[in-house]
Image (cartoon, grey):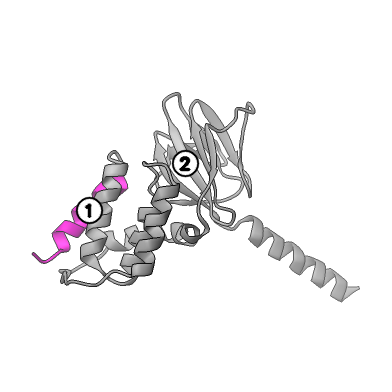
């Protein structure tokens, strides 16, 4: 009986880890708020990872785009709305449907969960970056180019994928160019503006 109880307990622990996995990424956000368990609201930042069970509040003019990394489910929501995030979709309190539901190409998904950490790392860099010519991976460029053909013109997923590949290769010139392109797609994104400002200060001219 003891072993049965231990096995059941381990099963519950593993299930809780699966439920709590941060498998949801904020692709874009405008004026959306994240609610705490106490109902307190804070501004939702782009590229953060969220948990199933998290709640979002969208005022009248707000919009948020969410991606479930495992499935590639891409939901676009417009306010007013109050969302509860489930493990595979978002649920609106008044059963309002999402503005759009799409699926991201599989090749782009895994990188999305790393973007937030990469941008934080860029902002925390010290010293001067030596910008040198680094050849870009033909395979990565081809994946991004094909994805752009499949996505809406303002969808940043292909460039976020490319940014992560360039970061991994320490290709600073390419990182800078991709950040500038992302800023064109999302000009009011404060995170991109902060990262670009810091990178410009650190790049040796």
List x then y, in percent, for residue 183: 27, 46
Which image quadrant: the N terminus?
bottom right
| Residue identified by numbered label 2 | 65
Relative placement, left or right, of 196 versus 93 is left
**Residue farthest left in this picture:** 205
Pinpoint residue 167: horizontal percent, then vertical percent.
32, 66
Regarding residue 117, the answer to whether it shows in the image is no
Q: Position of residue 149 (x, y in %)?
A: 41, 49
Highlighted magenta segment, given as a residue range: 189-205
Disc 2, SS:
strand
Residue at point 43%, 61% (across, down): 114
- How busy is the neighbourhood of tag 1: few (under 14 within 10 Å), some, or many (20 plus)? many
Residue 54 left/right relative to 194 = right
Quadrant of the rendering where the C terminus is positioned: bottom left
- Answer with the quarter of the image where residue 84 lies: top right
Tell me which residue sits at (28%, 69%) in the image: 136
The furthest residue to the bottom: 3
Would you name the residue on which mark 1 appears? Answer: 196
Q: Is residue 144 above or below residue 151?
A: below
* Dominant secondary structure (helix, strand or loop) of the stretch shown in magenta: helix
């Amino acid at each position: 009986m003891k072993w049965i109880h231990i096995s059941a307990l381990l099963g519950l622990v593993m299930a809780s880890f699966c439920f709590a996995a941060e498998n949801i990424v904020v692709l874009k956000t405008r004026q959306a708020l994240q609610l705490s368990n106490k109902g307190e609201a804070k501004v939702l930042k782009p590229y953060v990872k969220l948990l199933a069970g998290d709640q979002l509040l969208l005022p009248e003019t707000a919009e948020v785009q969410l991606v479930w990394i495992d499935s590639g489910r891409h939901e676009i929501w417009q306010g007013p709305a109050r969302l509860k995030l489930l493990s595979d979709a978002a649920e609106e309190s008044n059963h309002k449907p999402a503005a759009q539901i799409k699926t991201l190409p599989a090749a782009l998904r895994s990188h999305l969960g790393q973007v937030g950490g990469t941008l934080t790392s860029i902002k925390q860099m010290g010293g001067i970056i030596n910008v040198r010519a680094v050849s870009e991976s033909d395979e990565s460029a081809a994946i991004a180019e094909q994805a752009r053909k499949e996505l809406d013109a303002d969808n940043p997923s292909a460039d976020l994928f490319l940014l992560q590949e360039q970061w991994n290769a320490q290709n600073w010139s390419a990182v800078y160019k991709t950040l500038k392109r992302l800023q064109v797609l999302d000009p009011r994104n404060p995170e991109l503006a902060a990262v670009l400002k810091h990178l410009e200060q650190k790049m040796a001219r």
